[in-house]
Amino acid sequence: MNDEAPLVVADITSEARIRCAAIGQGAAEVVENLRAELEKSPTLGRQVHSAMGELKLYTTRLEGAASRPALTVTYVYDAPPPEPGLIRIALVSPARFAGGDSEF
């Protein structure tokens, strides 16, 4: 058993939880799994530029399943000293494909 405190604390914003509920089909569960994984590896995904230059903004894609569309998840990683850092999953939406259509 590991008694060490996590170096990063990850949370899902209320807005992202509402989006997961609207998407349904297991979106909340898969985003919760990502939240737990981000506490171990906070820089998963691809870093993107933000209008607020100091923010570390990341986006990642969660592959779809038979009952759930692929999802795009955007999160902010705030790691000022002293640790722990904080991750806020801020946006969850169905992934959009070039030339494709999304039902959401």
Image (cartoon, helix red, strand yellow):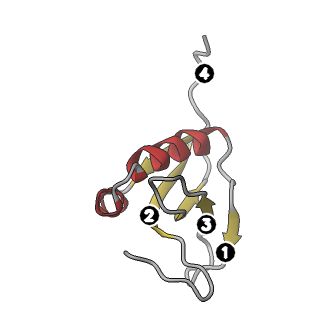
Q: Earlier in the sequence, mark 2 or mark 1?
A: 1
Residue type at mark 4: give it: Glu
Residue type at mark 3: give it: Thr
The residue labelled by disc 1 is 48
Front residue of this view, candidates 36 and 55: 36
Residue type at mark 2: give it: Ala
Q: Residue at x 39, y 49 (%)?
A: 28
Label 4 vs label 1: CA separation?
Answer: 31 Å
Please identify the quarter of the rendering in which residue 46 is found: bottom right
Label 3 vs label 2: CA separation?
Answer: 10 Å
Contact (CB < 8 A) between labels 2 and 1?
Answer: no
Label 1 vs label 3: CA separation?
Answer: 7 Å
Q: Residue at x 60, y 10 (%)?
A: 1
The residue labelled by disc 2 is 90
Question: SS class of the residue under badge 3?
Answer: strand
Question: SS class of the residue under badge 4?
Answer: loop
Q: Residue furthest bottom?
A: 99
Q: Position of residue 15 (x, y in %)?
A: 32, 63
Label 4: few (<14), some (14–19) or many (≥20) C-alpha neighbours in 10 Å: few
Q: Residue at x 44, y 53 (%)?
A: 67
Q: Closer to the observer: label 4 or label 1?
A: 1
> Of the numbered discs in the image, which one, if any, rests on residue 59?
3
Q: Earlier in the sequence, mark 4 or mark 3?
A: 4
Label 2 vs label 1: CA separation?
Answer: 14 Å
Residue type at mark 1: give it: Val
Label 1: few (<14), some (14–19) or many (≥20) C-alpha neighbours in 10 Å: few
Label 4 vs label 3: CA separation?
Answer: 28 Å
Measured along the vertical axis of the image, is residue 89 above or below residue 26? below
The residue labelled by disc 4 is 4
